[in-house]
Image: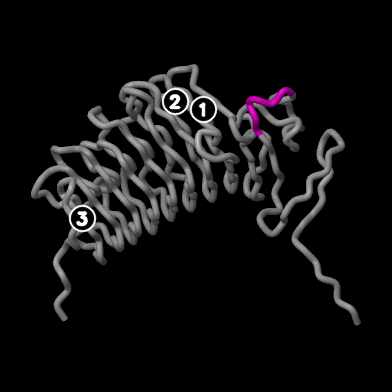
Amino acid sequence: MTIGTGTSFFTRKTSGAAFNVEDQGFSTGDRYFVDSGATNAANVTNGGSNPDAPFLTVAFAITQATAGQGDIIYVMPGHAESSTTINAEIWDISKAGISIIGLGEGDLRPTFTLGQAGVTCVIGAAGCMIKNLRFVGDIVSLVAMLEVEAAADGCVIEDCFFTDSAAQDALIMISVAADADRLVIQRNQFVGIVGLEATDCILFAGNTDATVIRDNLFAGDWKTSGAIGATAAKCNGMVILRNIVSNADGAAGLSIKMKTDNTGIVAYNAFTGTSANTEPVTGEDAMHIVENYMADVAAKTGIISATVTVW
């Protein structure tokens, strides 16, 4: 008996008589496309299901998605959105299980420019992912570029780029609400302007359990906690792994700041500060510390910090 070899690819007819060939091994949910530069782009119901007739905005695409079925929103290269209203949300992922995936490399990645006071982007539901998006702060003392709400358990933020424009700095790049657990923040790049008023790159407003922060690059000037601040409440099982941090702040000089009863592991990171004779990591008293290289000034080779275990 001959047994055929199957694949996970599936053909689906979409509105407008187009056919999509989709990898159901990745997700069986619906696919949507967003492209602000497309001639036929429009925010219309039953649209957006192929790249030749995409939606105009991510926010509208979210309204068309269905919670809990693994829908994917692809955002095309060169797509751009900016804020026009004070305290507005450019988008809010308010439905569980949605993935927003940006296409393109470098500055062609989909870009969200936050240029009004209080404007932000929001992850507000569980099991969501954002990938390969570009966030640009474009107003003095922007409160936060991206907000992760308490309901956003298990969300993933990966391969994104966060930066400021000219002399406009965000106080916080990612703000995480209390009780948002099991987050994964990985392979992102955070670049802040030196000499301005930024306080923290990633700030946890309360407890978080089993959150992983790994393989990120931080380069900026953060005056309070540095790259990662988690001091408001006890965080259990936090993993901080293989990150590179360069903080130009010469006062506190911190790379990360933990609450002294946080648990978890801090391993294989490179932490640097610019406050001489100041260890750039503080509050890690109850965490396991494994082979982190630290330097307190430029032009010096980092050393392994923390007290060595004696068997």
- Magenta region includes residue 35: yes
Q: Quarter of the image containing the C terminus?
A: bottom left
Labels in figure, total: 3
Task: Kindly state the secondary structure of the residue where label 1 is placed.
Answer: strand
Q: Nearer the viewer, residue 203 or 268?
A: 268
**Where residue 114 is drawn, which disc sits there?**
2
Residue carrying label 3:
294
Judging from the image, the colouring scheme is one colour
* x and y percentages locating residue 5 in the rendered image: 81, 70
Q: Is residue 260 visible?
A: no
**What residue did someone put label 1 on?**
90
State yes or no: discs 2 and 1 in contact (Cβ < 8 Å).
Answer: yes
Q: Earlier in the sequence, mark 2 or mark 3?
A: 2
Q: Are marks 2 and 3 in contact (CB under 8 Å)?
A: no
Q: Residue at x 84, y 39 (%)?
A: 18
Amino acid carrying label 3: it is: Met
Disc 1 crowd, CA 10 A, few/some/many (<14, 14-19, 20+): many
Residue 251 x/y as whole percent = 13, 38
Callout 2, which amino acid? Leu
Residue 261 bears which disc, if any? Answer: none
Q: Position of residue 53 (x, y in %)?
A: 75, 30
Mark 3 touches mark 1? (CB < 8 Å): no
What's drawn in magenta, residue-wise? 34-39
Question: Does 247 sit above or below residue 44?
Answer: below
What residue do we see at 81% from left, 40% from top? 14
